[in-house]
Image: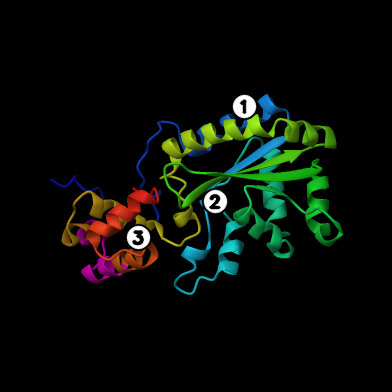
Amino acid sequence: MSQALRPYSPQSPEPTAELSSVPAAAGIGPRLARLRDQFGFADLCYYYDLTTLDQWSVGGLEKAKLIKKMTKRRNLFTSSVAARKLWQDQSRCYHSAEEDLQAMFDRPCHHWNLGPSQGPLRKSLYRHGYQHKLTLSIPCPLATAMTGRFTLLFANGDEHQQTLDSLEALTAELRLTNLQLSLDYSRDINPLVDYNIISPVSAYVLKLLAQGHSRDSMAQTMNLTLRGIDYHIGVLKQSLQASNIANLIDKGNKVRLL
């Protein structure tokens, strides 16, 4: 039997399954701060990301546009306010750093280029009190299409070298952290919604389909026509490359939308 529906409005918070009683914004930051203090670097940024952009370049959304969308992610989490301010500042410089952004998707460990060709990025980093930047990409064991990206910020060369010397231990700790964050929050911070590859409304339609609701009940509750419901189902099928509703729900589970 399907669950009772509650009214939904696009203006209301995105309806997602809550696996943790602590909201993502309040739960992730302190974990990042503990890792920062444990390993002795200046700050840490985290976001749950797509493993590769290639398979999601659909519907006219080219890879270059996806990279630009990445710089405007809502669900970015940091170990401090200073690190968040840096991200916001640097997002204005990323137009000249597409090679670095692409490299994050290609390499598990990426040292950001801060040479003469990246003057704006380097100046922004120095202005906020950091000197080096390293991104470690940790695959999600729950969904091969997803990866946790941890960007480490260093105030000086000693911090940077100390981290490189303990990289194996740090990577092991990040794997555990990424697994726990995925279990607790992956449905709330899903990058498919954050990149707007799948809209919050489409994600809600998928959730209701998985709960067994009919098109009629969804249309009534969401104040949409049947045609509108069918539109979102069509978009979901295209985006997730699903052949039917059962296949769509299966693939939705595999990318942590359900």
The disc placed on residue 74 is: 2
Q: On the picture, is 151 further left or further right than 50? A: right
Residue at the spot 35% in from the left edge and 56% down from the top edge: 203
Residue type beneath disc 3 = Ser
Which residue is most to the left? 1
Which residue is most to the right? 116
Q: Earlier in the sequence, mark 2 or mark 3?
A: 2
Q: Which residue is mark 1?
A: 34
Residue at the spot 67% in from the left edge and 51% down from the top edge: 88
Residue type beneath disc 1 = Arg
Residue at the spot 33% in from the left edge and 55% down from the top edge: 251
The disc placed on residue 92 is: none
Percent coordinates x, y for residue 30 in the rendering:
58, 30
Structural distance between the alpha carbons of marks 3 and 1: 36 Å
Which region of the structure is painted magenta?
219-231
Which residue is most to the bottom? 60
Residue type beneath disc 2 = Arg
Q: Which residue is mark 3?
A: 202
| Disc 3 element | helix
Percent coordinates x, y for residue 252 in the rendering:
34, 53
Q: Is residue 121 above or below residue 126?
A: below
Task: Judge whether residue 224 is colored magenta.
Answer: yes
| Disc 1 element | helix
Tags 3 and 1 touching, CB below 8 Å: no
Q: How is the image coloured?
A: rainbow
Structural distance between the alpha carbons of marks 1 and 2: 22 Å
Percent coordinates x, y for residue 40 in the rendering:
73, 28
> What is the magenta segment's predominant secondary structure?
helix
